[in-house]
Image: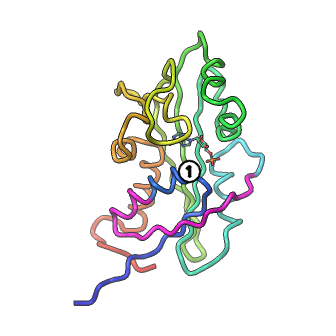
Amino acid sequence: MTQRTPPTIRFYTSNEGKVREVRELLEGRGYRVAWSRRELTEPQADDLEEVARAKLAAVPRGKDLALVEDSGIFVAALGGFPGVYSAYVLRTLGLPGILRLVDGKPRAAEFRAVVGLRDGTRTRFFHGAVKGTLAPRPRGSGGFGYDPIFIPDGKTQTTAEMTSAEKNALSHRGKALRGLARYLAPPGRVSRSA
Ligand code: IMP
């Protein structure tokens, strides 16, 4: 019996936490995820898809499917801030500084992700979002970034207190990646050659 080589998806990111989640989700669906560790230049844009589009335009053309991702946390009481600036705000204020910004305000927040795929000459974008609230203080050691302060609606744990499988099942990135997986291998089609 001949063994089919799993199609390779090359993920361009500097964020190891994203790589772990993307690998867990896509490798379970028969793809090989190769990591190209890159800090891709991001434009000043207030739209995740625009940022993902610019990232995708900056990655080299090769035989593999190329994957990029852009994500952020949008706090309603702050008019959607930090949104596309989430990485910068976390680096500069840290989680305690972000929690001070929402002190005494409604704590609703939403994580959003856009995953961009280049498949030959075609580019496709897949979106995912999860609503939740900001915890009073950081909890948990899993995940990355804002996970210790994000409690998805209907849960009591922060996403940093979940396993990565539990987080992927409900997260913005998990939803976007399941959209991508459906595009690559629609129901009824078992696998796809790269
Ligand atoms: P970028 O997509 O690299 O521009 O940065 C997104 C930033 O949003 C990351 O640095 C994280 O701080 C945050 N972020 C995005 N997704 C997640 C997540 O799943 N958990 C925690 N933080 C996240």
Magenta region:
23-42
Locate the N terminus by quadrant: bottom left
In front of the other: 73 or 96: 96
Residue 88 x %, y %? 71, 39
Quadrant for residue 27, please give it.
Answer: bottom left
Residue 63 x %, y %? 56, 81
Residue lying furthest right:
44
**Residue at figure coordinates x 54%, y 69% from the top left:** 10
Q: Is residue 21 magenta?
A: no
- Considering the numbered disc 1 on the image, is that residue within a helix, a strand or a loop? strand
On the picture, is 51 further left or further right than 164? right
Residue designated by label 1:
114
Label 1 Cα neighbours within 10 Å, binned few <14 / some 14-19 / many ≥20: many
Amino acid beneath label 1:
Val
Task: Please tell me in which quarter of the rendered image ligand 1 is found.
Answer: top right
Residue lying furthest front:
141
Residue 135 x %, y %? 48, 22
On the picture, is 21 further left or further right than 47? left
Residue 64 x %, y %? 53, 76
In front of the other: 131 or 41: 41
Quadrant for residue 37, please give it.
Answer: bottom right
Residue lying furthest bottom:
1
Q: Is residue 28 magenta?
A: yes
**Above or below: residue 8 compared with residue 179:** below
